[in-house]
Amino acid sequence: MSEVVIAAIESLALVLIVFTVAAYAILAERRVIARMQARIGPDRVGPQGIFQPLADVLKLLTKEDVRPVAADRVLHYLTPILTLVPIMLVFAVIPASPGIHLADLNIGYLYVAAVSSIAVYGVALGGWSSNSKYALLGGLRSSAQLISYELAQGLAALGVIAAAGSLSLVRIVDAQFPLPFAIAQPLGLAVYLLASIAESSRAPFDLPEAEQELGAGYHTEYSSFRFALFMLSEYVHVIVSSALVATLYLGGWWPFAGGLLGVAAFAAKMALLIFVFIWLRATLPRVRYDTLMAFGWKVLIPLALVQLTVVAFWVALR
Amino acid sequence: MMSPIRDILAIAKGMGVTLRTAFRAPVTLRYPEERPELPGRHRGRHELERHENGLEKCVGCELCALVCPADAIYVEGAENPPDAPISIGERYAKTYVINLLRCIYCGYCVEACPTEALQMKDEFELAAPTKAQLVVTKEQLLATLPKREPEDSWLPG
């Protein structure tokens, strides 16, 4: 019984940490992109704008929750949760340092791939249930995009799994001493990172929410707290992607053996990756839809296969 | 895919630009606290100038109203009373109204003015709670003369 209570408390703490990090990732993004565009960004709410996320959340909570008349009532209400929860579930198996994780599943990465795929339903159903053409097109685009890039992502991760000889994320990090997979499998890192950006629907692959053509894409018809949940899941997705890249390729707590230094190393790698996400968004324009599909199927998947072949030979001859 | 290496280099170049810009000083003006430096010939709100002796420069010729493309100026001239002159000319502006809501701030009225009575000043914060407050009359447009300093108190009157 007490184990259950401890697990619940740990999970709650993790959720709070992730939400806080997500809120500040939004602020960081606004400030960093502002500077990259020679602007200042939001800095009025509290010193350096540190209370901006709080103000934004309060604003969203006080807004009216509008549901379109033609929308599917049950699905429309459920989808924001259906988008956020699967992404949150991924954090359960991500180790910050040896022993600092909720669970060390022996099928770790398989769990990650399976659970994060469910988030596609949220996006697709969000578009469908709104009963609006913009939302529907946005939802369709994202489902096609997410499915295409999941393949490349999985193939790249397969190289890591083969080299580590385990699906467990803890064992994968252990296998990266002394050499992280980022150096051993640079091609895999590139494919995985690009696929992660597409997976989290971020610029330059943010077609599902292409403002100029689709309003806000699949969450066009959402407002108030439900919109906030979609917004939150986008940034939680960025954090999950950063955490996964840090774990799979940058060696988690490498170069430290563990403990608080390990957590610090892991956090630093995540922060760096989140910065890369923001940096890319500030720089690159959105790609065209056919280019996006061609890039996933004709470039990323073959590259991932090349990397996998090299790793396979290396594992066989070891 | 034309040339992958060229494409990657192009992206890297773009990433360099954004990173360099991030370390540049922002161009943002913190407006209510910081004021913009206006150019010398900024066309803001109008002002009707006076001569140093306090007499109005405007002689009520109505050229400004005639030239105004937005039809935002209304002037009504009248004979200048000889015993208590208001302007230096034979006539003066009895009523002078500018509708700032119609005004497009082109400055033609200033150019048309033969006595340089009408000028456009730096004032640009032209917002008001009601529309009526943005239809300004002669009293609001007339320049106030610089107040006499205490050391000028030896002057008669």
Image (tube, coloured by chain):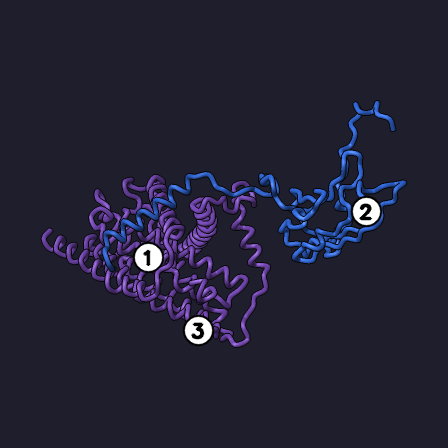
Chain colours: A purple, B blue
> Residue at point 21% right, 52% down?
A164
- Residue A292 position in % (x across, y down): 32, 63
> Residue at point 70% right, 51% down?
B64
Left or right? Give the position of A293 relative to B101. Answer: left
Left or right? Give the position of A5 relative to B81. Answer: left
Name the image quarter holding residue A44.
top right
Q: From the viewer's perspective, is residue A54 above or below residue B143? A: below
Q: Residues within 10 Å of mark 1 (few under 14, many from 20)?
A: many
Give how far apart the Cα atoms at labels 2 and 3 are. 75 Å
> Residue at point 44% right, 73% down?
A128
The residue under label 3 is which amino acid type? Trp
Q: Secondary structure at mark 2?
A: strand
Residue nearest the observer in this picture, A275 or A155: A275
The tag earlier along the polypeptide, 1 or 3, is 3
Residue nearest the observer in this picture, A293 or A270: A293
- Residue A142 position in % (x across, y down): 38, 66
The residue under label 2 is which amino acid type? Arg
Tag in front: 2 or 3 = 2
Which chain is home to disc 1? A
Q: Quadrant of the N terminus of chain A?
A: bottom left
Q: Are marks 2 and 3 in contact (CB under 8 Å)?
A: no
Q: Secondary structure at mark 3?
A: helix
In the picture of the structure, the residue carrying the numbered disc 3 is: A128
In the picture of the structure, the residue carrying the numbered disc 2 is: B91
The residue under label 1 is which amino acid type? Ser
In the picture of the structure, the residue carrying the numbered disc 1 is: A196
